Image (cartoon, rainbow, N blue to C red):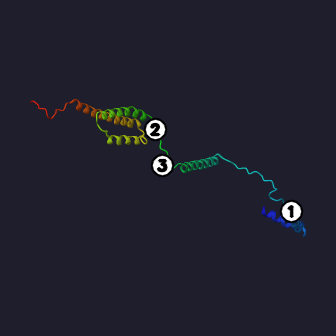
Amino acid sequence: MKDRLKDFVQAHRDEFDSFAPRPDLWQDIAAELQTEEKNVISPLETQKEANVISLTWHRAWKYAAAIALLVMVAFSARYYMASPPAGTLAAAKPVPLEKIAPEVRQIETRYVQVIEQKESELKALGAGNVQFAELDSAYNALKKELYTTPNKEVLLQAMSDNLKMRIALLNQQLEVLENRSHVKIPARHETTNI
């Protein structure tokens, strides 16, 4: 087949050469290009075609995951920047004990009234102030633990037992003082018969 094409081209070579371009053709083309460059519309005036973005499910999930990640980072940064350190939070805003365990107020009012009554009876009998330093420190420690311990019922029971123990000690002191007042002390100048 190549031979037939070669033979045909060689046979008709003169006819192909007759279609040569005229000599001033290149000058005309250059002149047209220069006029077109002058008439070119500025890029601002050209109308832009809308870009079509094909969005597959795979690509959509990638974008959704990236957006979710950015949102999580933003919220966590906002949370950690807005909240003060853990140690300063308790110091800045102490929560009242009534909000943590409202039963404390009921326990204290019930038992403190009895304790005050017993202490006033002791003073009437001539005893001085009764000091319960160990019980006071234990009670205050239990109160502080209420802020941090999730098992409040056990602590409330321990606080109630502490106050009951105070009442029991006061009752014992009252009995001792009452027994002393009922026992007659013999006078030293009297004689006793044996």
x then y, percent, for residue 13: 86, 67
In screen coordinates, is 28 left or right of 112? right
Residue assigned mark 1: 36
N-terminal of the pair, mark 1 or mark 3, is: 1
**Nearest to viewer (mark 1 / mark 2):** 2
User: Mark 2 = which residue?
Assistant: 100
Disc 3 to disc 2, C-alpha distance? 18 Å
Task: Identify the image quadrant of the C terminus.
Answer: top left
How far apart marks 1 and 2 lie (CA) works out to 86 Å
Secondary structure beneath label 3: helix
Figure quadrant of residue 172 = top left
Q: Position of residue 10 (x, y in %)?
A: 84, 67
Residue 176 location (% of width, % of height): 25, 33
Could you say which disc has been placed on residue 129 in the image?
none
Tell me the kind of residue under disc 1.
Glu
Upstream in sequence: badge 3 or badge 2? 3
Q: Could you say which quadrant of the image residue 190 lies in?
A: top left
Q: Amino acid at mark 3?
A: Ala
